Amino acid sequence: MSDPTIEAYLARLEPDVREAIDALRAIVIEADPGLSERIKWNAPSFAVGDVDRITLGIERKSGVRAVLHRGAKAKDSQDFVFADPTKLAKWPASDRGVLTFADAAEVEAKREALRDLFARWIAATDTR
């Protein structure tokens, strides 16, 4: 059964935005079915235990985003290294990647690479 807060969030989205968010959600779940999903920062966020790792959102002007991170609190990232050979994400910090997409078609076109990136991100930041 779906979380009612997630369903309520999704119900408020414009159809094209929801399609893109749903595509990203599906890929995150494929990458690691053991993640928990909740609404945090007014967006779907996927966590390992209680630590958020991938958060989805809506871009201000248009499109959607996925943010790869290691939780809400800043972590020492001096020795943290994560390889993104496909360069799908922009990395404002070594432990924070931001991916943006115009629409669901762009998400779907990158499905396999995204699934791999998300799975590797979870494995690299897993605290289970």
Image (tube, rainbow, N blue to C red):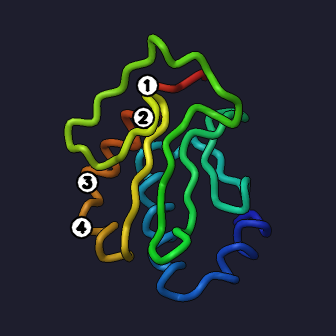
**Of the residues shown, which amino acid type is indicated by label 4?**
Ala
Label 1 secondary element: helix
In the image, residue 108 sits, relative to residue 79, either above or below, namely below
Q: Do the residues labelled 4 and 1 touch (CB within 8 Å)?
A: no
Label 2 secondary element: helix
Question: Which is more N-terminal, label 4 or label 2?
Answer: 4
In the image, residue 117 sits, relative to residue 120, either above or below, namely below
Q: Give the residue at x 64% y 59%.
A: 44
Q: Quadrant of the C terminus?
A: top right
Furthest residue in direction left, as rendered:
85
Write down the quadrant of residue 39 in the picture: bottom right
Q: Are marks 2 and 1 in contact (CB under 8 Å)?
A: yes
- Which residue was labeled with disc 2? 121
- Which residue was labeled with disc 1? 124
Q: Give the residue at x 59% y 21%.
A: 127
Give the distance between the C-alpha atoms of the residues marked 2 and 1, in whole angstroms: 5 Å
Q: Are marks 3 and 2 in contact (CB under 8 Å)?
A: no
User: Mark 4 packing: few (<14 Cα in 10 Å), some, or many (20+)?
Assistant: few
Label 3 secondary element: helix
**Of the residues shown, which amino acid type is indicated by label 2?**
Trp
Residue 91 in view here? yes
Q: Give the residue at x 34% y 47%.
A: 89
Q: Give the residue at x 62% y 82%.
A: 13
In the image, residue 117 sits, relative to residue 80, either above or below, namely below
Furthest residue in direction bottom, as rendered:
15
Question: Which is more N-terminal, label 2 or label 3?
Answer: 3
**Res 109 label:** 4
Q: Position of residue 69 (x, y in %)?
A: 54, 37
Give the distance between the C-alpha atoms of the residues marked 4 and 1, in whole angstroms: 24 Å
- Which residue was labeled with disc 3? 112
Give the distance between the C-alpha atoms of the residues marked 2 and 4, in whole angstroms: 20 Å
Q: Position of residue 126 (x, y in %)?
A: 53, 25
